[in-house]
Image (cartoon, coloured by chain):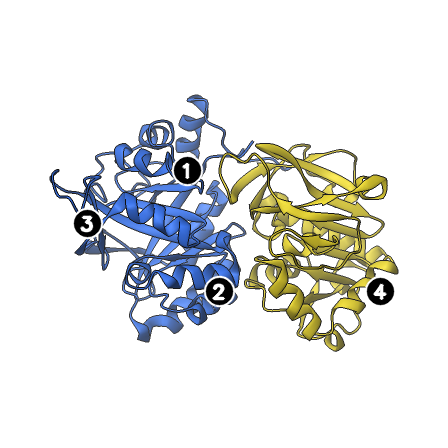
């Protein structure tokens, strides 16, 4: 299958701007649709969970859309998955932001970024990879990506630490990318990160089409 | 390390980018999506759109412009002007904005800041503060800076520094601070105003109003403590490129995003 045939479902749970991620995926050659409920995910090669804002209202809307179990099953089956910002944080067990219980796919919690000179952490910052990953193919080590957040997911235990892919410094070092199998989670916004971000999205689409 | 941002501002009225001095005598400077895309290619770190007409009947036009811009410029987009409710903010975000800037409406209805932050998160809520210097000795304005609203036309007797602190308490995740005295004059940023705010709030401060050249960007950051610097006319009129500004910032030892980081595989 070519990238042009890659079908992408974006989980649409009222999390604000979906235009940018939709456009980035389309630019990469994917065929994109928004799923307002789990039944609308349909046949898809890649599932994208975007999102900004607080965890509790996001989990409420995911539950109302019937998304919780389908997302867990999708990841458990190691199908291609991209979580962005809140869509990464929700993969952990819970959030200190509002005490919400989240998807619990990875051990760990979402906590307020410690020691930050400014908060929210808004702007372009470097992602330092701890290992190579095809999603970052063609992107230099330490490249800048766009962040806009106050909370970060902290993987716990050996199983949690094993998924760490990239780290970023803002007062303290935090996990800015995780990967396991065909799952990628990023704290930054690739759809807002210029040429580097478009390349990452194109890589993710290509990897999904090859899956 | 977090980069210091350079942000071209597009003042939009009736679907076109305009620029005037002290918010009057507006001159047409182009199509918003065209300019946004050009700036994104040149290395802008973010784009700010201010709908300075902000007439309710023009909302559809604005949302269309936001969406066309979001589909062409893959960098963050902040939209301000005419957002009066949580639903208005939702519409602007759904059209493709990443952040919304509240100004006049936040002064009139401070609870709006809190409601928007609760719904979309503080990181999506920018409070824009237009300030002017006033004669010292006014007990209502101890800092010597007064908030003006309605596009810089209407002083409201509110201390600008006190309002900045309050806005952050209410839920603002970023402050866009414009000196109305300097705006469009090319006389440099008001670093006293910037420093008075940036030294007292944890959130990032965007400096605005008065840029004449690259050295002013350096000063706004170094002396004003700004996290990001916004300008309009000097970019629209091609007096300086974003690359020239960033080169000056880098030469001054400030961290900036490299323009070309892609490598060929």
Label 1 sits on a secondary structure element that is helix
Chain B shown in which color? blue
Instruction: Please indicate, yes or no, whether residue B109 appears anywhere in the rendered image.
Output: yes
Q: Position of residue A50 (x, y in %)?
A: 64, 59
Residue position marked by numbered label 1 in the rendering: B242
* Residue at the disc numbered 2: B67
Asked if residue A203 shows in the view, the reply is: no
Whether the residues at callouts 3 and 2 have beta carbons within 8 Å, the answer is no
Q: Nearer the viewer, mark 1 or mark 4?
A: 4
**4 and 2 marks on the same chain:** no
- What is the chain identity of the residue bearing mark 1? B
| Location of residue A52 by image quarter | bottom right
Q: Residues within 10 Å of mark 2 (few under 14, many from 20)?
A: many
Q: Are marks 1 and 3 on the same chain?
A: yes
Q: Could you say which is closer to the camera, residue A188 or residue B237?
A: A188
Identify the residue at horizontal 21%, vertical 35% (top origin): B187
């Amino acid at each position: 299958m070519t990238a042009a045939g890659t079908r992408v479902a974006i989980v649409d749970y009222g999390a604000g701007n979906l235009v940018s991620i939709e456009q980035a995926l389309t630019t990469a050659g994917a065929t994109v649709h928004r799923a307002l409920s789990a039944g609308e995910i349909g046949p898809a090669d890649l599932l994208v969970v975007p999102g900004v804002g607080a965890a509790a209202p996001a989990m409420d809307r995911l539950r109302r859309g019937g998304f919780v179990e389908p997302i867990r099953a999708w990841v458990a089956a190691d199908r291609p998955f991209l979580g962005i910002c809140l869509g990464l944080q929700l993969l952990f067990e819970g959030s200190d932001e509002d005490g919400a219980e989240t998807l619990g796919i990875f051990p760990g919690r979402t906590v307020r970024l410690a020691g930050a000179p400014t908060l929210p952490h808004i702007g372009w910052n470097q992602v330092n990879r701890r290992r190579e990953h095809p999603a970052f193919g063609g992107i230099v080590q330490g490249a800048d990506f766009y962040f806009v957040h106050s909370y970060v997911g902290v993987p716990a235990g050996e199983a949690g630490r094993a998924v760490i892919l990239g780290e970023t410094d803002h007062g303290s070092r935090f996990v800015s990318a995780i990967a396991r199998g065909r799952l990628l989670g990023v704290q930054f916004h690739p759809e807002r990160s210029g040429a580097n971000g478009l390349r990452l999205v194109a890589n993710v689409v290509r990897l999904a089409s090859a899956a | 390390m977090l980069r210091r941002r350079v942000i071209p501002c597009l003042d939009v009225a009736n679907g076109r980018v305009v620029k005037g001095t002290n918010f009057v005598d507006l001159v047409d400077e182009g199509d918003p999506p065209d300019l946004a895309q050009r700036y994104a290619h040149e290395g802008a770190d973010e784009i700010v759109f201010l709908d300075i007409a902000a007439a309710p009947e023009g909302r559809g036009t604005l949302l269309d412009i936001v969406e066309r811009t979001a589909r062409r410029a893959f960098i963050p987009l902040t939209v301000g002007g005419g957002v009066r409710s949580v639903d208005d903010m939702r519409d602007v975000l759904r059209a493709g904005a990443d952040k919304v800037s509240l100004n006049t409406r936040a002064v009139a209805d401070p609870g709006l800041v809190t409601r928007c932050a609760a719904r979309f998160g503080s990181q999506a809520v920018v409070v824009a503060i237009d300030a002017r210097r006033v004669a010292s000795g006014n007990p209502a304005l101890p800092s010597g800076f007064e908030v003006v609203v309605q596009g810089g036309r209407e002083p409201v007797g509110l201390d600008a520094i006190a309002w900045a602190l309050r806005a952050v308490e209410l839920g603002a995740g970023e402050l866009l601070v414009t000196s109305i005295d300097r705006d469009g004059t090319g006389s440099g940023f008001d670093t006293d105003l910037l420093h008075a705010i940036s030294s007292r709030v944890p959130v990032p401060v965007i400096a605005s109003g008065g840029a004449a050249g690259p050295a002013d960007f350096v000063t706004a950051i170094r002396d004003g403590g700004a996290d990001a610097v916004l300008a309009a006319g000097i970019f629209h009129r091609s007096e300086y490129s974003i690359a020239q500004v960033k080169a000056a910032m880098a030469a001054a030892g400030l961290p900036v995003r490299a323009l070309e980081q892609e490598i060929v595989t």
